């Protein structure tokens, strides 16, 4: 048999990793629903014309075709979706007559992108998105709500401190126009690469590809260096001496987002004017999120305002959204040893089997525990109790139940403590009921 080779960019976690991923997804679902977002799933494929309509993503789309297509059979023109925003926009257009606007939805689903695999970047990965879409107009306060909802989610996870960095495309594009740019989108794309190629290379790119003068390029880099936790960034932008009406509007909107978030969650959101977001459909506030101390892996949650992504020619459906990169976050937590998992299986209890004739008694105990929401399993074989305890230990199961002669007892195999127990009343400690994911930083701080 040929040796199996792993597919780069298509992650498969061990059971401990699955526990971490499930925690992130379950917490996201809970937080999103608490904020009024309805769950949604869209199909995995979209017409290529829809996928390629916005943004520089054409080289990364996976195309669908039949392996045994007939000669001359037309191409289906379908591709796997590379994010959840584009298919959501299509969904809104198709179902607008049945939706109530503003429509708030969350979506936790896999996407596919033909990127070069590296730390935090995959070809198949899960995103957890929230979006709010209006009909013809959408109130600005939702741009604040996006940041606050994501900040709430990140605060509930056992992860290093996360900071949501915000900018505004109107601010950026107005500034670029003010320094003489003919193509603000080209400037945006160049600035978006500043973390990858550095300021000097970015300045050369701004002159060579975006057509700026050397002075204009330097002004753009000065803008990208502005960062603050409050509205003080506005004075620093104006001090650069650039004048433009779109710039003024962007400054006002960004001040509103930063100050609105600061009132609710101080320090969770900062203005960072290097944030550009490469996709072309963003028109207002844009978000990127970094883990403090782990900035090298890039953003774990990104998004922004879009005003024309969804339109049927008669009506426009503007929206704003933010997406958590679930797979990226989990890969960082596991790869950098930032979390520990109490056990890799859901079972809190292994019910021992005295002998095979008495297996039904063990099954009855398991049924009673499961009826009260306690995850358990029955020993696979009626081995000596010592061997069954070792089996539980290898699985990471903390308790072993002994149903002997009607006198039940349960043993905590970590401490060795064993006590009489009633399967209709016994409860494990709350921290043992489910697998626990704990932050290593938090544990170290307590020790």
Image: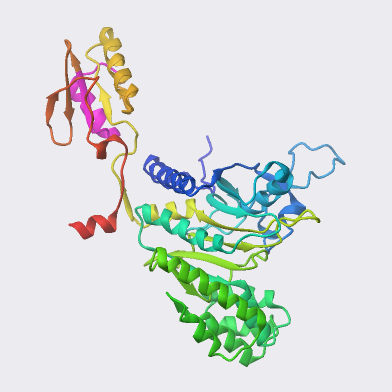
- In this view, the residue in front, 388 or 367, is 367
Report the residue at 63% width, 59% height from top: 138
The x, y position of residue 91, in whole percent, is 69, 46
The x, y position of residue 376, in whole percent, is 31, 26
Question: Is residue 320 positioned above or below 205 on the image?
Answer: above
Please say whether residue 64 is visible from this viewpoint.
no
Question: Is residue 70 positioned above or below 93 on the image?
Answer: above
Question: In which quadrant of the rendered view does residue 410 lie?
Answer: top left
Report the residue at 79% width, 38% height from top: 69
Per the image, is 103 magenta?
A: no
Query: Which quadrant of the figure contains the C terminus?
Result: bottom left
Q: How is the image coloured?
A: rainbow
Which residue ends up furthest to the right in the rendered image?
72
The magenta-colored residue range is 381-402
The x, y position of residue 427, in whole percent, is 23, 29
The x, y position of residue 190, in whole percent, is 62, 76
Left or right of residue 317, residue 390 in this image: left
Please say whether residue 343 is visible from this viewpoint.
yes
Per the image, is 387 magenta?
A: yes
- In this view, the residue in front, 412 or 388, is 412
Question: In which quadrant of the rendered view does residue 44 lie?
Answer: top right
- In this view, the residue in front, 26 or 350, is 26
Which residue ends up furthest to the top in the rendered image?
357
Report the residue at 57% width, 59% height from top: 116
Report the residue at 12% width, 25% height from top: 419
Question: In which quadrant of the rendered view does residue 140 lie?
Answer: bottom right
Tell me how many marks there are: 0
């Amino acid at each position: 048999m040929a040796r199996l080779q792993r597919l780069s960019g298509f992650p498969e976690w061990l059971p401990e990793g699955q526990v971490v991923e499930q925690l992130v997804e379950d917490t996201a679902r809970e937080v999103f629903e608490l904020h009024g977002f309805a769950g949604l799933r869209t199909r995995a494929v979209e017409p290529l014309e829809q996928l390629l309509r916005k943004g520089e993503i054409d080289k990364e789309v996976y195309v669908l075709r039949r392996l045994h297509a007939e000669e001359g059979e037309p191409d289906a023109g379908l591709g796997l979706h590379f994010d959840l925003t584009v298919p959501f926009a299509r969904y809104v257009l198709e179902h607008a007559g049945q939706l109530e606007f503003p429509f708030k939805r969350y979506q936790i689903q896999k996407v596919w992108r033909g990127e070069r695999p590296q730390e935090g970047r995959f070809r198949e990965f899960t995103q957890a998105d929230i979006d709010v879409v209006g009909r013809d107009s959408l109130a600005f306060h939702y741009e604040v709500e996006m940041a606050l909802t994501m900040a709430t989610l990140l605060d509930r996870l056992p992860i290093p401190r996360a900071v949501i960095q915000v900018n505004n495309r109107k601010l950026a594009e107005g500034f670029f126009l003010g320094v003489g740019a003919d193509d603000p989108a080209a400037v945006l794309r160049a600035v978006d690469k500043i973390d990858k190629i550095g300021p000097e290379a970015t300045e050369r790119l701004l002159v060579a590809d975006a057509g700026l003068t050397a002075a204009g390029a330097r002004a753009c880099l000065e803008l990208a260096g502005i960062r603050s936790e409050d509205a003080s960034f506005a004075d620093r932008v104006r001090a650069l001496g650039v004048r433009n009406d779109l710039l003024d509007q962007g400054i006002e909107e960004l001040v509103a987002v930063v100050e609105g978030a600061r009132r609710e969650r101080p320090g969770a959101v900062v203005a960072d004017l290097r944030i550009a977001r490469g996709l072309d459909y963003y028109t207002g506030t844009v978000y990127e999120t970094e883990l403090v101390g782990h900035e090298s892996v890039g953003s774990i949650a990104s998004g922004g305002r879009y005003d024309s992504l969804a339109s049927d020619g008669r009506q426009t459906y503007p929206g704003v959204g933010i997406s958590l990169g679930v797979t990226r976050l989990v890969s960082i937590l596991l790869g950098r040893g930032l979390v520990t998992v109490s056990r890799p299986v859901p079972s809190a209890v292994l019910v021992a089997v005295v002998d095979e004739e008495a297996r039904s008694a063990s099954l009855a105990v398991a049924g009673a525990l499961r009826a009260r929401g306690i995850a358990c399993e029955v020993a696979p074989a009626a081995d000596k109790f010592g061997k069954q305890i070792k089996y539980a230990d290898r699985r990471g199961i903390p308790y072993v139940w002994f149903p002997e002669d009607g006198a039940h007892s349960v043993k905590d195999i970590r401490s060795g403590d064993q006590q009489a127990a009633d399967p209709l009343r016994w409860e494990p400690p709350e921290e043992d009921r489910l697998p626990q994911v704990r932050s290593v930083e938090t544990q170290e701080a307590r020790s």
